[in-house]
Image (cartoon, helix red, strand yellow):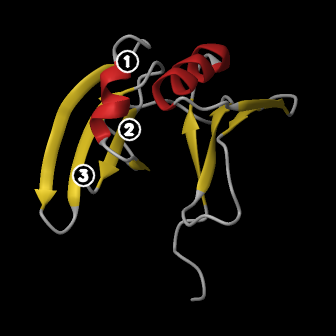
Amino acid sequence: MNNNMVGWFEIPVTNMDRAIDFYNTVFKINVQAQDFGETLMGWFPFDEGKPGASGSLIQNQAYEPSDKKGTLVYFNSEDVNNELNRVEDAGGKVIQTKTQISPDIGYMAIFIDSEGNRIALHSRA
């Protein structure tokens, strides 16, 4: 395989405006919304020249947010506390504070977003 395994991810939402506000606040980004009729998508910023996958928020009847089921998406961070410190003010809930995985791998944390999804963060420091 010539590429990394993950090429795209989608995070289910029930209220796109609320979800966009949450992610923009926590990550200090500008999520771009697009309406495809029965599907709304909120595109995360992506730079072709940087490593890693991109993805979107998605609102469609076939998707359902979950705090316990399914895949756990990890967002990269300089320091997980940067984003973690904004989660609750943005309408989410921290469920695991900054925790060292190992000295080689770094740190992780987990939160519930505004839509009820379990989301993780990872940083080396």
Tell me the kind of residue under disc 2: Ile
Image quarter of residue 32: top right
Residue topped by disc 3: 125
Single out the mark in the foreground, 3 or 1: 3
Image x and y of residue 96, in percent:
18, 33
Residue type at numbered disc 1: Gly
**Which tag is nearer the camera, tag 2 or tag 3?**
3
Mark 3 vs 1: CB contact within 8 A: no
Which residue is at 39% across, 49% downward? Answer: 74
Q: Can residue 67 be seen in this view?
A: no
The type of residue carrying mark 3 is Ala
Tag 2, which secondary structure?
Answer: strand
Q: Which residue in the structure is indicated by mark 2? A: 119
At horizontal 56% and vertical 33% (from top left) the residue drawn is: 12
Q: Alpha carbon of mark 3 to alpha carbon of mark 1: how far?
A: 23 Å
Q: Name the residue under label 1.
A: 92
